[in-house]
Amino acid sequence: MKTDRSSRYDDLTLAELVEHALALGEGQLSAKGALAVPTQRNTLVQRFIVNEPSVSDVIRANAQFHLLDSGVFNSIWERVKDDVAERDRYRVHAHMGVDTDIAVPLEITTVSAWHSISCHHLCHIPDEFNPREKPEWKLIWAPIASFGYAEILSDGGGVVLIHVGKRRILMGGDLTAGEMRRTLLTLLGLLLPEKKALPLHGAASQCDDEITLFLGPAGTQKTTWALRCGQLIGDRGLSWSNQGLHRLADGCRLHLDRNLPIDLDEALRFGTIAENLALGSDREPLVEPTDTESEIRTLSHLIIPLTRLNATQESSTRGPNQLAVLATDPLGVLPPLAKITREQCLAWFILGYSNHLGPLEERQAKIDIRFTPGFMDTLLPRNLDDYVFILEDLLEAHETRCFLVNAGWHGGQAGKGDPLSASEENAVVTEMYHCTDWEPFGSLGLSVPTGQPETAGPWHPRDRWPDLSDYITKESQLIQIITTELQRTNDPERWLKALEIECN
């Protein structure tokens, strides 16, 4: 065990970190070996970024960051660093990105051992740290008490502070590992476009010579869809450049629900972190249905290594050959599968259309339409056009085929329509690969497969509705909602034209 007199533990193995976490009472082992830890999921998180030219020139006006004076950040940094130096702490040297050409080297210091474990999965732990001798970023994740009585903490909760010029990040509070992932992806959202690379919230898979990329907001089951297509290349954290797709981390964070793309016993093996997973006296997970609802009792996330999934060992690949935009349409009028042009793909990327809850979420479904531009809105702090222009060039350079998949409801609104069955999802994947005969959908410039699949419902959603007039009403509502949202963009005429919506 590596240590020095100040009780700093450097680059411990997963086994050593788990031993520390248990000794510190940070969690308990499940029967299968996963480390179950409690977190405050509803913690209010304030995000600050230091106001400097490298930021103010590129950050968009509605990015969810407060601007912070450099002197204030430096004062807080020194206070936190000094306080953490008096505590037992864990330091890990990691890369955000597996490809050393684009990887960002990170020195991450945490006070909790389980936070350090999460870094092993949410980043890449290289055999050799920073071989290209790039400037290193330093991140400290500390208790909120370490921040003292800084005025910026007046709202309580958690806090994230980023200083791009100094390459420093502070995280404070009882945050989830998801906040760590968001912070790291935000960092890449700032840096990667300078290298003509695009950070992505998605999942990609490989089958034979076909590379398929699924993009979509949270709750669209990106990992599950990717696994239906072949071996997983990467999940949640990807980047795309002219060199191809690149995996950014060695693991992923999955919502524990009934659509978990891995057997629960396999997922809960040693090395996994289970956030907010309740354990019984026998240390078995308490995920049985409640007395009144057939749903998982606890809202948990699992942080697991990609090796647990059907993932390829390769961290980079060419392509992708095809890109599927996932949506969860609560109005039930989008088709299960539609072919779209690259221009239309850009419009759907800008929209990020979905419902707050997908059809397989554990809470009762309701219409709660959300727009998440770029599918990870707050994680893309630059002006959205910076990412759109890169995506436009990449789609053209790789001659990527584009599709829209409605992973939401069909034949009725949320809670009344039905999600796609497993056989219908398989039919969608098959048609993406093999369909050559498409017909106009009738609106939004979409095309749907011709004919009726043998093992699935109709491709055209109107044929799934019991009342055609209800369908027409909801279709008009969807077009109006999309029109209103696109009119807020920098170039509404372009995107309305792409979706064949008349400009008023």
Image (spheres, grey):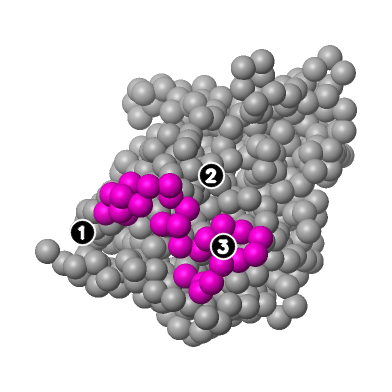
Q: Give the amino acid at mark 1.
A: Gln
Q: Note whether 495 is above or below 151 in the view shown.
A: below
The reply to whether callout 1 and callout 2 are in contact (CB within 8 Å) is: no
Residue 495, located in which quarter of the rendered image? Answer: bottom left
Residue in the picture at 43% in, 50% down: 465
Compute the Cα span from label 3 to label 2: 21 Å
Q: Secondary structure at mark 2?
A: loop
Q: In percent of the image, x 73 and y 66: which residue is there?
A: 230
Is disc 2 surrounded by few (<14), some (14 to 19) or many (20+) residues within 10 Å?
some
Q: Nearer the viewer, residue 120 or 246?
A: 246
- Residue 487 is labelled as 1
Residue 390 in sight here: no
Residue located beneath label 3 in the image: 214
**Horizontal side, residue 303 vs residue 138: left or right:** right
Q: Closer to the N terminus: mark 3 or mark 2?
A: 3
**Location of residue 398 with respect to 353 vertically, above or below:** below
The x, y position of residue 379, in whole percent, is 44, 51
Give the magenta-colored segment's residue range.
Answer: 448-476
> Disc 2 marks which amino acid?
Asp
Q: Residue 418 bears which disc, if any?
A: 2
